[in-house]
Structure formats: structure tokens, C-alpha cells
Amino acid sequence: MFKTTPNPPINDTKRNKAAHRAIDHYLNPTTEPAPETPSLFTVSPDTSPESLIANSYETVCSVSALLLDLSDDLTGKERDVALAIHQLSELSVLMVGKAMDQQTPRT
């Protein structure tokens, strides 16, 4: 009988190594998988409290300004909700401003 391909070698080390790599990949992982991060954004652990408070103050002020602009375009119940959220953001501005004063008193 005539074969179109010759018989493979009896001791094929290349194929055996590939099979062992595949088995080891699934059964004996060499490294532990990286832990999943709990959130998309994180705050650097070495950030100073002054920097955190200042950035929080600027963020809350931006939210307050955006809400005022939004409330100009709304009417009725939607405008009341936007203004209520604006009032809460203004209270947050006051509290963060007070925290800034306590953290770094003005001279």
C-alpha cells in the first residue's frame, strides 16, 4: 500500500513538549491571575489631604454650576428637581470649604 505521507517519527519530542505545555497551562498555572480592581478609578494612596479636599471642592463647584445651567433650560417638576440637587451641591461646597479652612487655615 502506498501512503501519500510518511509515518511520523516514533519519538516526536516537539509534539510531546507542546502537549506538556498545553497541559501545564491549564492544570499547573505558574503565576496567579491578577486580582480584579474593585473600581475603574482609584485615588493614589499617597495623595495629600489638602489635594484631596481642593479637588473635591472644585468638583462640587463644577457640579453646582452645571446644575444651574441645566435648570435654566427646564420647567416644572424637572426644574424643581435640578434646583433641589443644586441646593444639595451648594451645601456640599460649604462643607468642603469648611474642611479646607480647618485643614489649611488661611492667614
Image: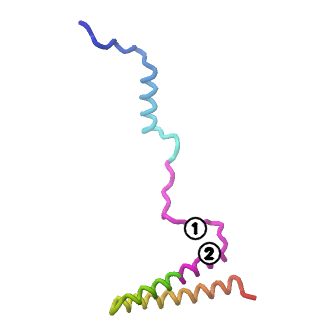
Q: Residue furthest top?
A: 1
Q: Which mark is residue 52?
A: 2
Q: Which mark is residue 57?
A: none
Name the residue: 42% across, 24% down.
Answer: 15
| Residue 64 vertical position relative to residue 11 in the rendered view, above or below | below
Give the position of the C terminus as an image quadrant: bottom right
Image coords of residue 28 (percent x, y) = 47, 38
Which quadrant would residue 95 be assigned to in this image?
A: bottom right
| Residue 94 is a magenta residue | no
In the picture provided, is 27 more to the left or to the right than 93? Answer: left
Name the residue: 46% across, 88% down.
Answer: 68
Helix, strand or loop for disc 2: helix
Q: Nearer the viewer, residue 36 or 64?
A: 64
Marks 2/1: CA–CA distance: 9 Å
Residues rendered magenta in the picture: 33-61
Q: Which residue is mark 1?
A: 43
Image coords of residue 59 (percent x, y) = 54, 79
Task: Give amino acid for label 2.
Answer: Leu
Image coords of residue 81 (percent x, y) = 38, 89
Helix, strand or loop for disc 1: loop
Whether residues under marks 2 and 1 lie with C-beta atoms below 8 angstroms apart, the answer is: yes
Name the residue: 47% across, 91% down.
Answer: 87
Q: Residue furthest left?
A: 1
Image coords of residue 88 (percent x, y) = 48, 88
Q: Nearer the viewer, residue 16 or 76?
A: 76
Name the residue: 54% across, 66% down.
Answer: 42
Disc on the earlier residue, 2 or 1: 1
Q: Residue furthest right?
A: 107
Task: Give amino acid for label 1.
Answer: Val
| Residue 62 vertical position relative to residue 17 in the rendered view, above or below | below
